Amino acid sequence: MPSEIKPHYQVVVIGSGYGGSIAASRMARSGLKVCLLERGKEFRPGEFPNTEFEAAREISITLPELTIGSSSGLYNLHVDEDINVLTGCGLGGTSLINANVAIKAEPRVFECTCWPKQIRNDIHTLIEEGYTRAQEMLMPRSYPDSYPALAKAKALEKSALDMGYPFYKPELTVTFEAFKDGINHVGMNQEPCVCCGDCVSGCNYAAKNTLAMNYLPDAFNFGAEIFTQVSVSHIAQKDKQYEVYYNLLHEGRESLHTQETFL
C-alpha cells in the first residue's frame, strides 16, 4: 500500500520497465534499501483486457497539450510531431504489451561513432556480460517445433528462401516448457504458452516472461519495496539528499491534494 512508503530510502527507482526493474533488482541484490514507484496498476494473469471494450478503457493518448483517458491506462500512445510511440503503463512497463522478441543488436549499432568511446570499447566485455545476465533472467526461447506450425512463419520462411535470405526463428521471452511444480527461477507461478496470440494486449495465462515474472519479483525477494499507482511529479535536491514528490492514484482518479514527499 502507498501508505507504507517510508520517509527515506537509499535508492528510489521511478518506473518498472526494463531500466527500472533491472536497476531495482541489481541495487536490492547489492544490499541497498530500495523503493520502486510505478504510475500504473499491477496486472495479474487473468486481469488483462480480453475484449475491445475492456481494452478501450485502458487506452491513454498523450498529446503535446493534453492527455485523453486515464493517465494510468495500460496502453499509452504518445503522439508527437515527429514520432508516435506506444508504451505500456503498469507493473512491468512495456514488457506487458511488447511482442517478446529478444535479439541482440547487430554489431554495427554499437560500433557507430555516435556512442561514447568507452561504450564501444566494452562491446565484447561489459555489454556482452549484460546480454548474458539478461538472458539468464528473461529466459528467451525460440518457438519450438513441438508447438503447432504457424502459417505466418511458414510464409515468411518461403519468402526468405525465395529471396535467398537465411530464415530463423528469433528468441522470444515466452515460457514454452513447464517449470518443475510450475514455479520459475524467481519463485513465480508460470505456465507454458497456449498460443492465444494475445502477447501484445496482455498475457492472461502466465506464460509471457514479462518483468513482473522475473526482475521485479527478484528485486522484491531481495528486499525492494514496490508501490503501484504512484505518479512522480518531480525530484528536487535538498542539501546532499533528494526529495521525490509524488501523487497517489486510486481507482483511476488522480489524488490532487497536497503532494507527499520523501527523501
Image: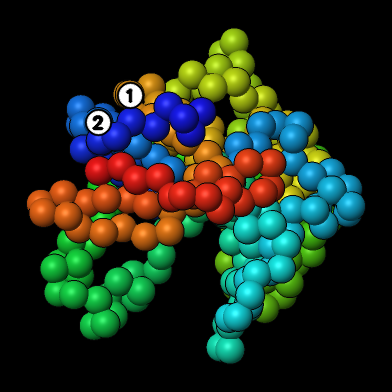
The image quadrant where one finds the C terminus is top left
Residue for point 54% across, 22% down: 188
Residue 31 location, quadrant? top left
Q: Residue furthest left?
A: 240
* Crowd around label 2: few <14 · some 14–19 · many ≥20 (10 Å): some
Q: Secondary structure at mark 1?
A: loop
Label 1 with label 2: CB-CB less than 8 Å: yes
Whichever of labels 1 and 2 marks the residue nearer the N terminus, that label is 2
Residue 21 in view in this figure: no
Residue named by callout 1: 223
Residue 202 placement (x, y as % from top left): 71, 45
* Crowd around label 1: few <14 · some 14–19 · many ≥20 (10 Å): some
Residue for point 63% across, 58% down: 71
Give the residue type that dot 2 points to.
Answer: Lys
With 131 as the anchor, is 166 left or right in this view? right
Location of residue 189 with respect to 234 vertically, above or below: above
Residue named by callout 2: 33
Give the residue type that dot 1 points to.
Answer: Gly
